[in-house]
Amino acid sequence: MADAITIRAATRGDAPVLCELLRQLGYPAEESEIPGRLEALANFPCAAAFVGTNGYGEVIGLATAHLFPSIHDNDPVAWLTTLVVLEDVRGAGIGSALVRYVEQWATRNGAKRISVTSGAQRTATHEFYLRRDYEKTGLRFTKKLGETAS
Ligand SMILES: CC(C)(COP(=O)(O)OP(=O)(O)OC[C@H]1O[C@@H](n2cnc3c(N)ncnc32)[C@H](O)[C@@H]1OP(=O)(O)O)[C@@H](O)C(=O)NCCC(=O)NCCS
């Protein structure tokens, strides 16, 4: 299956399977929300949404990535901002292919480093990144805004 993987830009026509992928990732969305999100990514100065397809052209994985300018460095920093593969085809090399593709995209766009944040509960995914030369260097702190003042 890995041999037949093709990676291309996500389109609004992918909305149904993108919803399924986002549901499996824990971020359920309505199909009607997807075109606006893809448009917002396209309008961002340097961001991309890629899908992996199997030999039949069916979408089986999703990755998004962003590049940001930094005051810490002269080079932009890249972030892998989404990665998910359909549950029934995991372990067949699709996630690895998407990560490599995003790394190449980031390199072409001038990044010298790529990072990813991953929920503390995703322990198998942490091993996936560590085995692909990602180092664990920090913790993520996150806060919902506009609900309580503290
Ligand atoms: C992490 C993920 C994208 C990897 O995709 P994939 O197509 O299964 O990855 P590959 O086939 O290229 O590689 C499989 C590797 O992932 C590991 N893995 C992690 N979670 C897995 C799962 N649920 N099923 C199968 N393999 C999994 C395997 O142990 C294997 O490890 P190794 O090759 O380093 O020995 C995929 O498992 C997934 O969608 N997980 C749930 C969502 C998630 O955690 N996304 C990342 C958020 S930061």
Image: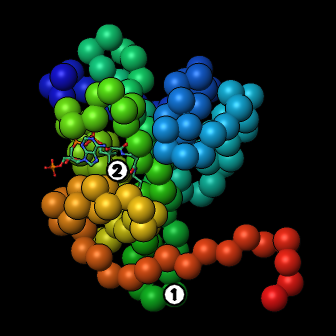
Residue occupying the point 34% across, 50% down: 102
Do the CB atoms of the residues marked 2 and 1 lie less than 8 Å apart?
no
Q: CA distance from mark 2 to mark 1?
A: 23 Å
The residue under label 1 is which amino acid type?
Answer: Ile
Residue 44 or residue 82, whichever sits in front: 82
Locate residue 9, reporting x and y percent.
46, 33
Label 1 element class: loop
Residue 53: x %, y % from top left? 35, 24
- Frontmost of labels 2 and 1 is 2
Provide residue 61's location: percent of width, then percent of height: 39, 34
In the drawing, what numbered circle is on residue 71?
Answer: 1
The residue that label 2 is drawn on is: 102
Q: Position of residue 148 (x, y in %)?
A: 85, 78
Q: Residues within 10 Å of mark 2 (few under 14, many from 20)?
A: many
Q: Residue at x 74, y 28 (%)?
A: 32
Residue type pointed to by label 2: Val
* Residue at 55 percent of width and 46 percent of height: 26
Does residue 84 appear left or right of residue 100 in this picture?
right
